[in-house]
């Protein structure tokens, strides 16, 4: 076959191929903005190696609670330098919620001095009640600040687990421990609660 005939045939083949590809590109829609809702969603991100224990919790308590609440599958791996958290589910909302909860463990919100919070009693001890004021953040209302001016012998005489309570942040020590005072709807300490 003469070289000029071969060159002409190859040029025509190239033009035909490019024409076909052009028609195909016009007919084919671009990539979807959203993945199919039935497709599994997987998110992976790095966490500091010293936070792996906090994310997993004692005997897997924390990670199991997040999995049970969200329905997402979560795995935490250690590559020696960083931890890798992988979250998977067919429900994108479950993946997002699980990631949000893990982010709260890694970067807990901080309480602000003087701020009033609507809290919930989460633990009762001989010396006071621990009140959850933010996700992952509890503070202590000392027994001396309960009872509205009257001495009480037991925290349970005025508060029970799960009780709602409005509190003000009075102190945050160098270790991050939060001291709280019960307040009324006006944000002022309850009469005789010892706050101030």
Image (tube, rainbow, N blue to C red):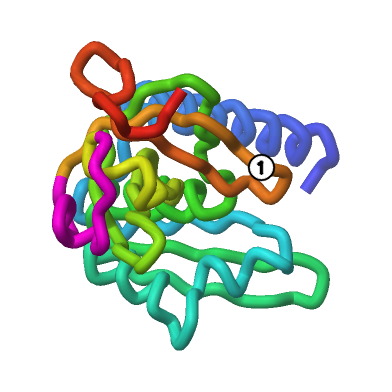
159 or 41, which lies in front?
159
Q: Position of residue 17 (x, y in %)?
A: 54, 35
Outermost residue, front side: 150
Outermost residue, bottom side: 59
Please report the bounds of the magenta region as a residue range: 149-163
Q: Is residue 5 visible?
A: yes
Q: Position of residue 15 (x, y in %)?
A: 59, 26
Q: Is residue 70 visible?
A: no
Q: Residue at x 47, y 24 (%)?
A: 22
> Is residue 7 in the magenta section?
no
The quadrant in which residue 46 appears is bottom right
164 or 101, which lies in front?
164
Disc 1 target residue: 173
Q: Residue at x 41, y 46 (%)?
A: 100
Q: Residues within 10 Å of mark 1 (few under 14, many from 20)?
A: few
The quadrant in which residue 167 appears is top left
Total of numbered circles in the picture?
A: 1
Give the dominant element type of the magenta stretch: helix, strand or loop. loop
Q: Residue at x 22, y 22 (%)?
A: 184
Q: Is residue 69 left or right of residue 19?
A: left
Q: Position of residue 182 (x, y in %)?
A: 30, 33
Instruction: Name the secondary structure under disc 1.
Output: loop
186 or 191, which lies in front?
191
> Is residue 156 in the magenta section?
yes
Placement of 161 over or under 17, stated as above or below: below
């Amino acid at each position: 076959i003469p070289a000029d005939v071969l060159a002409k045939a190859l040029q025509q083949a190239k033009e035909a191929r490019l024409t076909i590809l052009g028609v195909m590109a016009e007919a084919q829609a671009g990539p979807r903005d959203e993945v199919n809702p039935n497709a599994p969603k997987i998110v992976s991100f790095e966490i500091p190696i010293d936070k792996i224990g906090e994310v997993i919790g004692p005997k897997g308590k924390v990670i199991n609670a997040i999995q049970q609440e969200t329905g997402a599958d979560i795995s935490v791996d250690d590559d020696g330098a960083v931890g890798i958290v992988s979250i998977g589910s067919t429900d994108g909302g479950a993946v997002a919620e699980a990631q949000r909860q893990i982010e709260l463990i890694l970067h807990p919100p901080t309480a602000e001095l003087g701020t009033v919070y609507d809290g919930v009693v989460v633990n009762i001890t001989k010396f006071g009640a621990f009140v959850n004021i933010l996700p992952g953040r509890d503070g202590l209302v000392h027994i001396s600040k309960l009872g509205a001016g009257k001495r009480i012998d037991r925290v349970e005489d005025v508060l029970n687990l799960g009780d709602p309570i409005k509190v003000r942040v009075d102190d945050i020590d160098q270790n991050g421990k939060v001291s709280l005072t019960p307040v009324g709807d006006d944000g002022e300490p309850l009469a005789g609660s010892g706050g101030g």
